[in-house]
């Protein structure tokens, strides 16, 4: 079976491409390399000891999509391609709506024309907004994301729901990720942010490896046990395996529009993450407390039981493993893929 993976050269896409190859699927990656390097896929091929097909192209380019979908018999599409920097989305909303929303519409139009109706989509816990008590479960109404990035994910979720209702040939999984971290245990592939990292773990890892001086902890006055923000960090390989389970479910079940949380169900504070990283790496992380980051919520963690039951999937790697694997990747690749 052949799977089209959009955005497959990126962080989560490359780990999922590896899991797909190891599970015996053939993989075609479409990526415009806006936030990725071709090197990630060379390493995926080396780890899997199998080749994949890479096409440098854009999901907004209908011609490229039509050509690809005609050339291959895809069983499904896993759709990671998109822009994900929250702050940038505030200053460049049109770019985010064009890439994330229009790009997904174009992809679905091309899939429909080619008769490919199974789609796994990268959504985010951000669609829940900030008004629900924890843990977050799929039965809760979606909320009001606080930025254009989050709104683009919510818009796409709604587009996909409408699409599945309009035509029963569609089978769609909307996967709501919590906070993906970590790297493949080989240390060969991992997260390689361009510029200053927006997310906690890449920043901590770059401080540890000497690329940055000091971590800013955004707020110590939240209503949490130690005052810092609490999140549900999930190992990227657990996430990748969750995609394979979602894919299997789409391939073997009736047509529907499914929504599954991919999280661990366990929250950790910023200070707990720093402590776990220091213990895993043996490196002290200098940090200073700063004011809250606008748009941040105090707590965010999942109820993962629906995915556990329906996908027969459970995140199994603990916080220590997430830190050990992050550190192995960062230590072996201090400048990322460059
Ligand atoms: P990433 O930036 O590493 O990967 C996205 C990939 O898509 C990159 O390789 C980029 O070059 C490619 N891309 C972007 N626009 C494209 C376009 N128009 N055409 C073709 N390729 C394009 O990000 P990631 O962390 O791997 O995230 C993957 C998906 O998961 C994204 O949709 C993101 O919004 C979503 N997500 C990520 C997180 C997270 O914290 N990492 C959390 C929730 C959801
Ligand atoms: C985690 C915690 C910060 C950086 C974001 C997006 C979300 C999703 C995942 C895509 C928070 C604190 C962070 C730093 C810090 N992405 N922090 N110093 O904000 O939960 O989620 O990425 O869908 O949409 O909003 O993740 O890693 O940025 O922050 O103190 O330098 O770490 O305040 O409490 P977040 P994060």
Image (tube, rainbow, N blue to C red):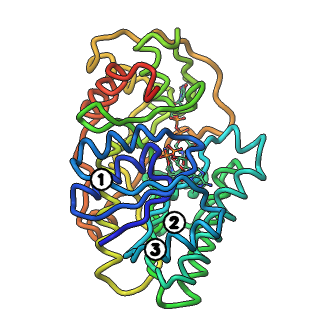
How many neighbours does mark 3 have within 10 angstroms: few (below 14), some (14-19), or many (20 or more)?
few
Specify which label sits upstream in the sequence, 2 or 3: 3
**Label 3 lies in ligand 1 vicinity (Cβ under 8 Å):** no
Q: Which residue is mark 2?
A: 140
Q: Which residue is mark 3?
A: 71
- Image position of 188 (left or right of 121): left
78 up-or-down from 167: above or below: above
Q: Nearer the viewer, mark 2 or mark 1?
A: 1
Secondary element type, mark 3: helix
Q: Which mark is residue 275?
A: none
- Image position of 298 (left or right of 240): right
Secondary element type, mark 2: loop
How many neighbours does mark 2 have within 10 angstroms: few (below 14), some (14-19), or many (20 or more)?
few
- Image position of 312 (left or right of 157): left
219 up-or-down from 305: above or below: above
Specify which label sits upstream in the sequence, 2 or 1: 1
Residue 132 position within the rendered picture, expressed as x and y whole percent measured from the top left: 55, 55
- The reply to whether callout 2 and callout 3 are in contact (CB within 8 Å) is no
In front of the other: 222 or 2? 2
- The reply to whether callout 3 and callout 1 are in contact (CB within 8 Å) is no
Q: Which residue is mark 1?
A: 51
Residue 244 position within the rendered picture, expressed as x and y whole percent measured from the top left: 30, 62
């Amino acid at each position: 079976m052949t799977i089209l993976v959009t955005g497959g050269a990126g962080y989560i896409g490359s780990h999922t491409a590896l899991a797909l190859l190891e599970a015996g699927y053939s993989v075609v990656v479409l990526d415009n390399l806006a936030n990725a390097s071709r090197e990630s896929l060379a390493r995926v091929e080396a780890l899997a000891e199998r080749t994949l097909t890479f096409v440098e192209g854009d999901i907004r380019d209908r011609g490229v999509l039509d050509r690809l979908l005609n050339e291959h018999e895809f069983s499904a599409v896993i759709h990671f391609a998109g822009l994900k920097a929250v702050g940038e989305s505030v200053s460049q909303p049109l770019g985010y709506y064009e890439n994330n929303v229009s790009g997904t519409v174009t992809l679905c139009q091309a899939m429909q024309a080619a008769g490919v109706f199974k789609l796994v989509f990268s959504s985010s816990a951000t669609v829940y907004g900030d008004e629900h008590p924890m843990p977050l479960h799929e039965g809760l109404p979606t909320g009001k994301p606080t930025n254009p990035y989050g709104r683009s994910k919510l818009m796409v979720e709604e587009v996909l729901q409408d699409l599945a209702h309009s035509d029963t040939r569609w089978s769609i999984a909307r996967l709501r990720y919590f906070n993906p971290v970590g790297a493949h245990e080989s240390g060969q592939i991992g997260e390689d942010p361009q510029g200053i990292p927006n997310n906690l773990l890449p920043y901590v890892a770059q401080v540890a490896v000497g690329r940055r001086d000091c971590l800013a902890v955004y707020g110590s006055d939240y209503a949490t046990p130690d005052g810092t923000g609490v999140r549900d960090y999930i190992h990227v390989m657990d996430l990748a395996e969750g995609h394979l389970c979602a894919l299997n479910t789409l391939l073997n079940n009736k047509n529907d529009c499914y929504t599954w949380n991919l999280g661990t169900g366990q929250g950790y504070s910023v200070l707990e993450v720093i402590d776990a990283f220091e213990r895993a790496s043996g490196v002290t992380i200098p940090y200073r407390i700063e004011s809250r980051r606008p748009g941040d919520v105090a707590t965010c963690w999942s109820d993962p039981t629906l995915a556990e039951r329906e996908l027969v999937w459970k995140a199994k790697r603990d916080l220590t493993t997430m830190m050990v694997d992050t550190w192995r990747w960062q230590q072996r690749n201090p400048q990322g893929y460059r």
